[in-house]
Image (cartoon, rainbow, N blue to C red):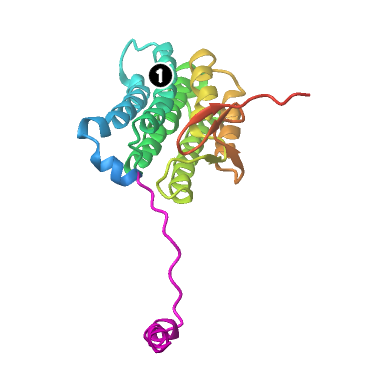
Amino acid sequence: KKGSIGSLGRMAPEKSTGESEPPPITRDNSSREFFQRPVLIRNIPNAITLVTVACGFLLMTSTSIPGMSPQVCVAATFLGLVTDVLDGQAARWLRVKSKFGATFDQLADLTCFGIGPAIFFTRQRQLHTPSSSSLGFDSLLTATAGYAYMGCSCWRIARELIVHDGARPLYFVGIPTNLACVGVVPLSAVTPSSWWLPWLVLILSGMMVMPVHIPKGLGFVKVTETEVTVCSRRAD
């Protein structure tokens, strides 16, 4: 009995501190696994993202390259949409997700789906609108719409980086830039002189910065941290 009392006495100071044991910490092994991968493997998603940047660069420079067809810019935009999906998918498959990759992806989106389409739209309107030579209402409307699209794209990407803290987002705040550019670039190539085109660009610009959460995948696919699955229809 004395031995047991002595044992309790020795344990008493440990209990008298009043400090409870900290809860177990669940650590994410993605960073450790990231640095264990070879450099070449780690940068495969970033190499795909660079293709998206190149598509945005083509949109910007096409206005100054003689003989560049607008259809080439449309094709570059859709190629950028494909690579924008592939880089995230590659990061999941290879388990090399990182804050740098997520931030790089957002900046590539700004280049290809924000700044590039804004410049392309403005230039197309100037080339195909008869009154573009004078500073009239149509010219001011075109410049306002182009600048609004670029400014709202920058605003939206900056907000995404803060909201998701450098991680790949699982939902959108406002419509994504890659969805807005699907309407801006093809229509600017096909019907650049339409009176309603600047108004559509202004509407899409406002929708990009509206404070509404939109699920990534738009209800067609379900995106998680580890996989992308097609949403199944519910039985009636």
Quarter of the image for the N terminus: give it.
Answer: bottom left
Q: Nearer the viewer, residue 65 or 56?
A: 56
The answer, for residue 192, to whether it is visible in the render is: no
Span of residues in magenta = 1-29
Query: Does the magenta segment cover residue 157?
Result: no
The amino acid type, in three-letter code, at marker 1 is Leu
Q: Please, what secondary structure does the residue beneath circle 1 have? A: helix
Q: Residue 22 magenta-drawn?
A: yes
Q: Point out residue 73 in the picture as x, y percentages from the top left corner.
A: 40, 17
Residue identified by numbered label 1: 79
Q: Name the residue furthest right.
A: 236
Q: Horizontal placement of 104 versus 35: left or right?
A: right
Q: Residue furthest front?
A: 1
Percent from the top left, x then y, of residue 129?
51, 19
Residue 68 visible here: yes
Q: Position of residue 142 (x, y in %)?
A: 51, 29
